[in-house]
Image (cartoon, coloured by chain):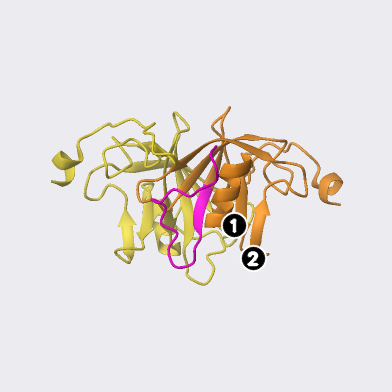
Chain colours: A yellow, B orange
């Protein structure tokens, strides 16, 4: 983690947002997919905690700010075109607001394949 | 894989595109991040081979159509909001057009961490 200055190779495009994937650094499980703004990437580099941009709330979003389920970012990788990021993280509890470890807990055919790790009613209720 | 009909829970939004992450089903390495249209998802389900939507070429894109570096999709997962997909794939050769196994072969600080698996000049030259 450095001073938060941005890598000049990133291509945020017209809407100033690019997708970022969070991957569990210990299990390699994919935890979630969200969007980041330049400010979110800078905040992530500066604090070592994953920040995203909430499109629904239209604001910078510190992951786990409400739930405590923070992500400690061990490494940030950039894709070949500079328009996608990979956060390699240590995930506190579960990444998903539904109580699952990963947001990708269902197959496209509706089968549940993920692991529930907390009760969302106790965290958000 | 079924008849290619779409899962009704997917939320493609206004631009009819959502991001899809491809993950190596054997190593759990994240290979690439791209976008899919409803047509791309249907083609993927129908053929068992990963299809995306190329925003630069503005067309349906069969991964490996030029290079032969196809992705056999073992499972498709959907995220909690229905606006992100995970393709669990068997990757032929490398996913990246630069010759690397993964498109995420660099850290944000510019360090190369990925593995080069083919010579792009021989494939695309």
Disc 1 and disc 2 on one polypeptide chain: no
Q: Would residue B102 be seen by someone viewing this image from the given angle?
A: yes
Mark 1 nearby-residue class (10 Å; few <14, some 14–19, many ≥20): some
Q: Secondary structure at mark 1?
A: loop
Residue at x 23% of width, y 34% of height = A118
Mark 2 nearby-residue class (10 Å; few <14, some 14–19, many ≥20): few
Whole-percent x, y for residue A82 in the image: 59, 57
For the record, the magenta segment spans B1-20
Whole-percent x, y for residue B92 in the image: 70, 35
Residue A60 position by quadrant: bottom left
Q: Are marks 1 and 2 in contact (CB under 8 Å)?
A: no
Which residue is the site of mark 1?
Answer: A82
| Left or right: where B47 falls relative to A42 | right
- Marks 1, 2: nearer the viewer: 2
Whole-percent x, y for residue A75 in the image: 49, 42
Residue A40 is one of the magenta-drawn residues: no
Q: Would residue B109 be seen by someone viewing this image from the given angle?
A: no
């Amino acid at each position: 983690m450095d001073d938060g200055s941005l890598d000049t190779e990133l291509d945020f495009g017209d809407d100033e947002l690019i997708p970022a994937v969070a991957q569990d650094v210990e299990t390699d499980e994919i935890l979630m997919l969200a969007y980041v703004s330049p400010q979110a990437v800078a905040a992530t580099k500066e604090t070592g905690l994953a920040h995203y941009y909430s499109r629904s709330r239209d604001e910078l979003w510190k992951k786990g700010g409400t739930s405590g389920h923070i992500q400690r970012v061990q490494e940030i990788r950039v894709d070949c075109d500079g328009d996608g990021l990979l956060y390699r993280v240590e995930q506190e509890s579960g990444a998903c607001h539904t109580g699952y470890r990963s947001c990708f807990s269902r197959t496209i055919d509706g089968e549940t394949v993920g692991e529930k790790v907390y009760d969302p009613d106790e965290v958000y209720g």
